[in-house]
Image (cartoon, rainbow, N blue to C red):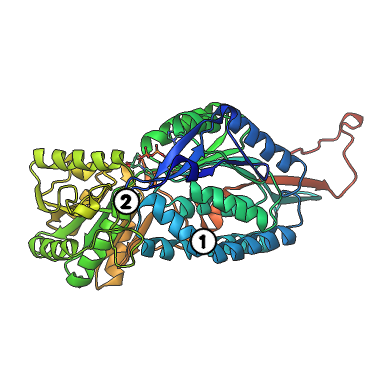
Amino acid sequence: MKTLENVAAYRHFIDGEEQPSAGGRTFDVRNPANGTLVARVAEGGAGEVERAVDAARRAFADGRWSRLPVRERCRILSAFAQEIERALPSLSTLESTCTGRPLREMRAQLSRLPEFYRYFAAIARTAEDSVTPFEGPYLNYVRRVPLGVVGQITPWNHPLLILTKKLAPALAAGNTVVVKPSEYTPLTTLALARIALDAGMPPGVFNVVTGFGSEAGRALSSHPGLAKLDLTGGTETGRVVAQAAGANLVRVNCELGGKAPVIVLPDADLEQAAGGAIFAAFIASGQTCIAGARILVHESQAEEFAERMIARAEALRLGDPLLPSTQLGPLVSERQLQRTEHYVAVGMQEGAQIACGGKRATAPELRDGYFFEPTIFTGVRSPMRIAQEEIFGPVTCVLSYRNVDEAVRIANDIPFGLGASIWTSDAAKGMKLAERLECGIVWINDHHRIDPALPWGGMKGSGMGRECGIEGYREYTQTKSVVVNLDEPVDWYATTDVVRLS
Ligand code: TXE
């Protein structure tokens, strides 16, 4: 049992230093697998955000990062990537302890992080500016320059991966950053800021303010000193944050909710597709914005397919996330657990059938954690709330369709549009179908697969803007045009000649 004296204490990371909150306010971070106290963390508000933005503004203005020769900036990013690689075992354990996600998942996910810093460093190092076909004796060259101070607000489901998708391009492009991580999972973000400093990143470039969304998050998103605000969170949070930033004419990138369809075409290998659907639905206990939450199966195969999924779901091993045998961890919080239970009740009221799961896990060793059994609803129709609203728990719905047109209608009949997957043995058929889906990312015979080069973002209520890829890098830059007159300047008032100005 941890006593208050030996609980780890974490503070904000501002200007290259750990800093407490004014008044010494703190909040607790607990392990969702067993409720134990993991750490006491400084609770920031407007004052701490002000300090962090000011440090980032100074770091940007004096050019210690933004005007560093790009080669040097990339060298530091490569050193950062290398230090992250070295720290992967401890980062994975800490991430697993705070999110409740199985260590196996965290290791697989975090092992990709260094690649993102190397990829964006390579883009910055190889980026070439352009020259426009400006008419007349002029040279118009267009440079891409950093934006300034950017605010990044991140969630608890993939704390380091989601941060990295924003941080790597922001830093590579020369911006300075203030991050407000989720109040549930701030520890690895603080650890990452320390690693960056140790890898040679100048103080003030990467700052972290910990605290709650309603206070620290609100202060950051409404700060007029930002050049951009980048959020991953719930759709409601996205609306609030975009309004606050918009009032200051701060550009906004939002990666919000989702409810991905998994479309199983009749020609698919059903066993492979069932494995894919289970992976899509239950990785991270369904707490991902691309969770396969609607499994669309041809009516002639729906029953058989559901049976295959049920067999696999019932075989999933729930347990201590740190054990290598564990396949499904707890939900991140009591709140997510209650939300999941609420939606299961809604589904039953709506007339859907629980084919497996549907309740909190009852094994004695799981009772102190937020564990919920993997749950499959059958008999679901698209207008039902369980098929329309983001549950963000280990719950998925099987829906049947009569033909491909109906599958497309169901897939698109939702306010979200982030990810989707198609399972088929005919890639051309899959590609044709992909064209008809209203979403930002479509996998064919896979799901959840990411890469730093993949432009990531949604349509409709799933957000605006794109992370990653060359587009994601560009969104952390702005153009600056320089127009050089290669001839004698026109003395406008000294002549009566007709001179074209445009
Ligand atoms: O996320 P929040 P919550 C969805 C998912 C989940 C629901 C609620 O459906 O069930 O959102 O989760 C900060 N101003 N997603 O409430 O609140 C907050 O502190 C500024 C989808 O935990 O959106 C945290 O750092 N910031 C999603 C971040 O926003 C505010 C991932 C996200 O938290 C704020 C997470 C405010 N007013 C949840 N309110 C995805 N796309 O993957 C909160 N925050």
Give the residue type that dot 1 points to: Leu
Judge by depth and name the residue closer to the eye, 294 or 499.
Answer: 294
Identify the mark nearer the N-term, 2 or 1.
2
Residue at 23% over, 43% down: 340
User: Which numbered disc, 2 or 1, marks the residue closer to the eye?
Assistant: 2
Residue at 33% over, 55% down: 284
- The quarter holding residue 376 reads bottom left
Q: Position of residue 160 (x, y in %)?
A: 48, 53
Give the residue type that dot 2 points to: Ala
User: What label sits on residue 33 in the rendered view?
Assistant: 2
Residue at 49% over, 48% down: 187
**Is residue 286 shown above or below 5?**
below
Q: Is mark 1 within 8 Å of ligand 1?
A: no
Label 2, label 1: how far apart the Cα atoms are: 25 Å
User: What label sits on residue 243 in the rendered view?
Assistant: none
Residue at 61% over, 52% down: 194
Judge by depth and name the residue closer to the eye, 127 or 100.
Answer: 100
Disc 1 designates what residue? 113
Element assignment for label 2: loop
